[in-house]
Image: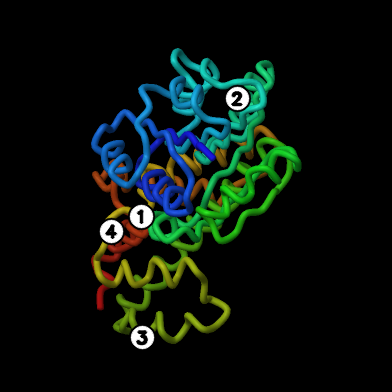
Amino acid sequence: MKIGFVGLGIMGKPMSKNLLKAGYELVVFDINKDAVNEVVEAGATAGNSPKDVASQCEYIITMLPNSPHVKTVVLGENGVLEGAKAGSIVIDMSSIAPLASKEVSAKLAEKGVEMLDAPVSGGEPKAVDGTLSIMVGGKQEVFDKCKDILSKMGASVVLCGEIGAGNTTKLANQIIVALNIAAMSEALVLGTKAGVSPEAIYNAIRGGLAGSTVLDAKAPMVMAGNFKPGFRIDLHIKDLANAIETGREVGAPLMLTSQVMEILQALKVDGKGQNDHSGIVQFYEKLAQVEVRK
């Protein structure tokens, strides 16, 4: 089976490599030629454009930064829509606004092309080892055709509802992750400022009710002072902006999300937008004049 893959960034590159390892034939495209060359060396074929990729493949995966990028790549000049044939399936694994997913899906449907919105959670480490959590929106019959493909990139693949439901679920996920990291940051800064080892705090609470996947993933990074991005602050700002916009559209108040958004914006202004989102702790460290380290 030949699959198209457009978008070979921090997440897309390892995801595409996992499809190659699973035995799929891949045609790939990205504006970053170095990324394309790396995946080609792993066994893929390079496409000349999203249109070219779509013309060669029944299944086309996109993994892009935000709604405008997806619209350009799928609906724009030399985009996926121009090359896709009726009966093809576009699997957009980007994290974008739910309404944007619905808009793109409607345009594709005019040509007889199906779509799933299938954003992921887990960051670069889980993209590399193929254990992402994948949240999917779309028709049951389309999901059934694509589940085996998705399962090569994720340990959890769940159909959440119709088009847009995947990205709505991802927004819920991103709210919980952001608030977890902020809570962890407040707590570890408090403990450190009060003279208690953050490592001791972490080891004491991780097995109790305060324990979480977020805590286990991010506390060791914070204590090591390692803010190399698995998921950048700039991207979390994008996700929370989509969440806040969606909340306003549907009438759901997001007060805590808005507060964390302001923390992320402050870090961006401070030149830390490319840091991992565990870098939220730096906002609290600066105010408390203490560093949470082993």
Q: Quadrant of residue 12?
A: top left
Q: Which mark is residue 230?
A: 1
The answer to whether marks 4 and 2 mark residues whose Cβ atoms lie closer than 8 Å is: no
Q: Which residue is mark 4?
A: 227
Secondary structure beneath label 2: helix
Amino acid type, mark 2:
Val
Spatial distance from mark 2 to mark 1, Cα to Cα?
Answer: 28 Å
Q: Which residue is mark 2?
A: 104
Q: Earlier in the sequence, mark 3 or mark 2?
A: 2
Q: Earlier in the sequence, mark 3 or mark 1?
A: 3
Q: Residue 245: horizontal and vertical position, in percent?
A: 58, 34
Name the residue: 47% across, 50% down.
23
Q: Residue 100: horizontal and vertical position, in percent?
A: 59, 28
Q: Is residue 74 left or right of residue 101?
A: left
Q: Nearer the viewer, residue 105 or 226?
A: 105
Q: Is residue 148 left or right of residue 283?
A: right
Q: Disc 4 or disc 2, which is closer to the eye?
A: 2
Label 4 crowd bin: few (<14), some (14–19), many (20+), radius 10 Å = many
Name the residue: 75% across, 40% down.
141
Q: Disc 3 or disc 1, which is closer to the eye?
A: 1
Label 3 crowd bin: few (<14), some (14–19), many (20+), radius 10 Å = few
